[in-house]
Image (cartoon, rainbow, N blue to C red):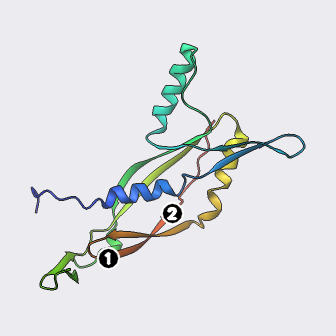
Amino acid sequence: MLGQTWYNEHIKRLVSVFGTLFNNLHVQRKDNSGNLVKDIRVPLSYGPKQKWLTRLEEDAEANRQTEISLPRMGFELSGLNYASGRKLPTVNQNFKNSSNKDNIISQYNPVPYDFSFDLWIMSKNMDDGLMVLEQIVPYFTPQFTLSIVEDNTMGITRDIPIILKSVNPQD
């Protein structure tokens, strides 16, 4: 009922899991002989790309050392759309015995939504950007499925497909 306060952290968990997919990518720079010169872990943060572009432009104009290192990645939750094709009857419930065996815990079926995320890669040169992109794209054919613990109390785990819809390079 509207007006009741409750928070199951489902959206927070989904955002966190999405970010975790991309938090351990590296760029490796090699010399002309093919020897590894530098291994850079690509930092990942939550937030819009425009925020980082603005910070880079402001720091460049002030001629001061920037705290933003490139390459870097970021992502943001960009939309939610109701998914009527996955809708289950609202009145159906999941049940589980509680720890004291006298109570039963219940939960109604969830309401299905598709969440849209934007993931961006920012780099000083094209080679770094392509190296990061090549570490991501092969896993999406076009989807990559994760199992997420949706509710610890009920013990519900769901398979969540993450679908790569497009890649849009920008210079």
| Disc 2 crowd, CA 10 A, few/some/many (<14, 14-19, 20+) | some
Tell me which residue sits at (13%, 82%) in the image.
103
Q: Is residue 94 above or below residue 148?
A: below
Taking depth in this image into account, of 80 and 17 the one nearest to the observer is 17
Tell me which residue sits at (29%, 59%) in the image.
9
- In this view, which residue lies farthest toward the front? 100
The quadrant in which residue 41 appears is: top right
Residue topped by disc 2: 163
Q: What amino acid is labelled 2 in the image?
A: Ile
Tell me which residue sits at (54%, 67%) in the image.
144
Sequence-first tag of 1 and 2: 1
Q: What amino acid is labelled 1 in the image?
A: Gly
The quadrant in which residue 82 appears is: bottom left
Q: Is residue 125 left or right of residue 147?
A: right
SS at badge 1? loop
Q: Is residue 14 left or right of residue 34?
A: left
Residue topped by disc 1: 155
| Disc 1 crowd, CA 10 A, few/some/many (<14, 14-19, 20+) | few
Image coordinates of residue 1 in percent, x first then y, are: 10, 63
The quadrant in which residue 33 appears is: top right
- In this view, which residue lies farthest toward the right? 33
Image coordinates of residue 62 in percent, x first then y, are: 54, 14
